[in-house]
Amino acid sequence: MRVLLDTHAFLWWVENDPRLSGAAGKAIEEATEGLLSIVSCWELAIKVSLGKLVLSKPIERLAEVLGASEFRLLPIDLDDAARVVTLPFHHRDPFDRMLVAQALNEELAIVSGDPIFRKYGVKRIW
């Protein structure tokens, strides 16, 4: 199964944080492909710049962390942006709405502790 990690799930995975559920960890380990959206990188950068998040490694080393974790970056394309337009407003967070669009377009399960994703018909693993 191909999985798209929500931002918090990615952070908790790479930092071996106990807040990551057992089912989420197992899904990541067994995934045929682990993906991190570029929108999550953008979200991390914004939160770091606002002082709302402190990372264990500088954000400039995110590519190194991705490589070590064998995750692939998922770019945003115009189909993803267009899909956001059609989504109902179950969730107002623009980062999460893009993750939903990408998951629907790419037929990906989302690894996330946020149950709102199910309202969009996306398979959520937690």
Image (spheres, rainbow, N blue to C red):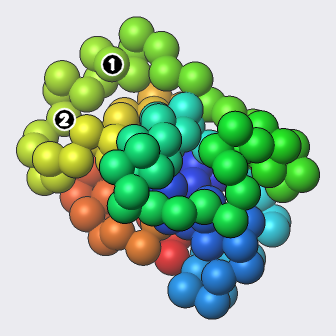
Residue beneath label 2, please?
Answer: 87
Which residue appears at 72% of the width and 57% of the height? Answer: 57
Name the amino acid type tagged 2: Leu
Under tag 2, what secondary structure? loop
- Point out the residue furthest to the top here: 78
- For residue 109, side relative to residue 30 (left or right): left
Instruction: Identify the mark at residue 100; answer none if there is no mark.
Output: none
Under tag 1, what secondary structure? helix
- For residue 61, side relative to residue 119 (left or right): right
Give x and y (percent) for residue 4: 58, 49
Q: Quadrant of residue 15?
A: bottom right
- For residue 84, side relative to residue 53 (left or right): left
Give x and y (percent) for residue 101: 37, 34
Q: Quadrant of residue 46?
A: top left
Which residue appears at 76% of the width and 43% of the height? Answer: 61
Closer-to-camera residue (58/30): 58
Residue beneath label 1, please?
Answer: 81
Cα separation between marks 2 and 1? 11 Å
From where the camera sits, is residue 121 visible?
Answer: no
101 in relation to 59, above or below: above
125 in relation to 61, above or below: below
Q: Quadrant of residue 75?
A: top right
From where the camera sits, is residue 22 visible?
Answer: yes
11 in relation to 4, above or below: below
Report if the CB atoms under discs 2 and 1 are less than 8 Å apart. Answer: no
Give x and y (percent) for residue 88: 12, 40
Name the amino acid type tagged 1: Ala
Closer-to-camera residue (90/48): 48
